[in-house]
Amino acid sequence: MKLMRVGTAGVEKPALLGDDGSLRDLSGVVGDIDGALLADETALDRIRAAADSGELPRLDATGLRIGPPLARIGKIVCIGLNYHDHARETGAEPPAEPVVFFKAADTVVGPNDTVLVPRASVKTDWEVELAVVIGRTARYLESAEDGLAHVAGYAVAHDVSEREFQIERGGTWDKGKNCETFNPLGPWLVTADEVPDPQDLSLKLWVNGELKQDGTTAEQIFPVGEVVRYVSQFMTLYPGDVINTGTPAGVAMGHPEPKPYLRAGDVVELEISGLGRQRQEFKDA
């Protein structure tokens, strides 16, 4: 299933993208798309039954905003330097263990919402990423297979980053990762049953129509199941938590000088095969 949330920011309603491309209203079946729903097999079964019945009301998508496909996100755990090609382009050694940092849930916006270039920023960068949404409480998992079993679904994430704040201003990466609007998510939350192999997905990103990133999750140093297992050794993952699993080569930081960092007026588009497409215009904060 492709689960969505549509409408004005803060008052989105749950929706389903049908197999025929139509948008269907789920508000008569479930209250919202969140961790509680994803953990409840009976709720998911109700959605499937309603979809199969053909009786879900059709929504007119014309002019309808697409919001983040997940409400009330608990935490966003991010994995850095998780692609062999990205490590090569930045001159970094592939890490022996996953690099873990956090993004605040309030950085999440819809897939087509405006993204704000922070004040005083000169190194705002792009990163297309596969987002993993947790569906079962995970603690001290023993295998990568067990990790995959705790995944409810997948989505496109844009891990927007300010490299000067992240790398040159001291301390942890958090200052360059948690600026307002820095985590567009969606358009869909695609349930795990529709993604048989998360290591066989293509990721692409364009800036002003020019292809910048063209990668595959097969390049991940630590695959999805292992990432979930690993993170569960250090913290409990709850339904509705999100893991951003890293970005492939092609970020602005990896380009030769002058590096093409983002400015107000730039348009970024990104997609992952089967998970949908995003489009953001960048404006000054």
Image: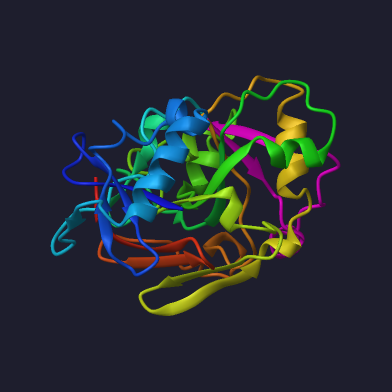
Residue at 76 percent across and 33 percent down: it is 229
Q: Is residue 48 above or below residue 40?
A: below
Nearest to the observer: residue 245 or residue 253: 245
Q: Is residue 82 above or below residue 165?
A: below
The C terminus sits in image quarter: top left
Q: Is residue 91 above or below residue 238?
A: below
Q: How many marks?
A: 0
Nearest to the observer: residue 202 or residue 36: 36
Corner quadrant of residue 209: bottom left
Percent position of residue 199, x then y: 71, 59
Say whether residue 184 is visible: no
Q: Is residue 65 above or below residue 71?
A: below
Percent position of residue 139, x then y: 71, 21
Instruction: Kindly give the residue lying farthest to the bottom in the view shown.
Output: 210
Residue at 18 percent across and 46 percent down: it is 7
Percent position of residue 119, x then y: 30, 43
Residue at 59 percent across and 28 percent down: it is 171
In the figure, is residue 172 to the left or right of 24?
right
- Residue 87 inside the magenta-drawn segment: yes
Say whether residue 262 is visible: yes
Percent position of residue 142, x then y: 84, 29
Corner quadrant of residue 8: top left
In the figure, is residue 33 to the left or right of 155?
left
Q: Specify the color scheme.
A: rainbow
- Residue 8 inside the magenta-drawn segment: no
Q: Which residues are magenta?
A: 76-102
